[in-house]
Image: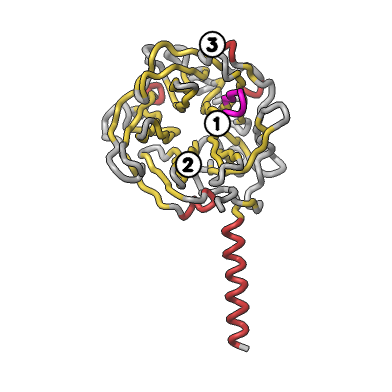
Amino acid sequence: MKRLLICLVFIIGTQISFAQQKTFTNPLLPSGADPWVIYHNGYYYYTNSTQNNLVIWKTKNMAQLASAEKKTIWIPPANTLYSKELWAPELHYINHKWYMYFAADDGDNNHHRLYVLENASPDPLKGEWIFKGKVGDDTDKWAIDGSVFEHRGQLYMIWAGWEGDENGQQDIYIAKMKNPWTIAGKRSKISSPLYDWEKYGDLGKDSKPPHVNVNEGPEILKHGNKLFLIYSASGCWTDFYALGMLTASANSDLLDVRSWKKSAKPVFKKSVKNGVYAPGHNSFFKSPDGREDWILYHANSKPGQGCGGYRSPRMQKFSWNKDGTPNFGEPVKEGALLTIPSQNK
């Protein structure tokens, strides 16, 4: 009888373990704003904002992010223009080297600019990370949420920035790059808050400024002969933080604002029914077998939780509409059992 009970416990335990390997629930981590992931040589490399350093997680399965190997790859030196408020890091593999882009300042948000590190090691958790300096155009205006992408042999940077020197509105800019750490030529503004759903941004009458309109967190998604720029709209301090979309033809001049058509409605927004608030600042990845498309984003579990440490990373599979546009669906409820990204056989 005892042996039978032991066998039953083993079988049940094995079944539970197997189920855990095949399914997961959101959130992936208890906290982690501005999540970013890149797949390279069989591994996912993940990062998110930690405020005071840069950390990379390494895993073969994004559903197992909580138990993944991780390493702090860089701590900024004290008393510099980039010592504090490190935001929205992104890891990119360009010309056989790793680059980590991030925004930082000296403790004053008005001084936020974009910076980049370089590492020649095949594994970004190994080797030496070298500080390459500030990445910016000649206006040297406030800038956050830098991302880069290659299109037809040309490297581009996209980011959120200010038109002038004072806060009040965040727009999205694009520029060509000479190399992974140098912008070439002028910046071009391709998106500004236009619709009401992009303009939730009250901070209170005693704040300076009392209201900010926001377009930020731009990310490129390619499909067919189109480029989609998915961005976050409205203030992250509101429950209305959501994803918007710009669409451009692959044959167009990406620096020309007329090449980009803005969708009139958000493509991903809060779900009161599912208890998901302020979803945004996303990235994209493919399943290990390359067959599925996934969106990675942060969100709050309750209303009114704002831009702080309550934001947690979540992921879910998305599909494509008949017209070739992405269909992200509705943010999935916390704790809902989801199938892990399809694996290589």
296 left or right of 85 in image: right
- Judge whether residue 199 can be spotted in this image: no
Looking at marks 1 and 2 on the same chain, the residue that comes earlier in the sequence is marked by: 2
Callout 3: SS: loop
Quarter of the image with the N terminus in it: bottom right
Q: Are marks 3 and 2 in contact (CB under 8 Å)?
A: no
| Residue at x 65%, y 24% (from the top left corner) | 197
Q: Residue at x 69, y 20 (%)?
A: 264
Q: Which amino acid does the dot numbered 2 rest on?
A: Tyr
Is there CB contact under 8 Å for labels 1 and 2?
A: no
Q: From the viewer's perspective, is the residue at label 1 or at label 2 nearer?
A: 2
**C-alpha separation, residue under disc 3 versus residue under disc 1:** 28 Å
Residue beneath label 1, please?
A: 236
The disc label shown at residue 163, or none: none
**Magenta segment:** 221-229
Question: In front: 144, or 135?
Answer: 135
Which residue is denoted by mark 3 in the rendering?
256
SS label for mark 1: loop
Kindly identify the amino acid type of the residue bearing the numbered disc 1. Cys
Residue 78 spot, x, y in % from top left: 26, 34
Asked whether, in this view, residue 181 is left or right of residue 300, the answer is left
Residue 150 or residue 27, whichever sits in front: 150
Inter-mark Cα distance, 3 to 2: 30 Å
Q: Is residue 323 visible?
A: yes
Where residue 220 sits in the image (x, y, percent)?
A: 54, 27
Question: Label 2 belongs to which residue?
Answer: 39
- Residue 194 coordinates in the image, percent (x, y): 62, 16
Q: Going from the N terminus, do you reach mark 3 or mark 1 first?
A: 1
Q: Quadrant of residue 5?
A: bottom right
Q: Earlier in the sequence, mark 3 or mark 2?
A: 2
Whole-Å distance between the Cαs marked 1 and 2?
27 Å
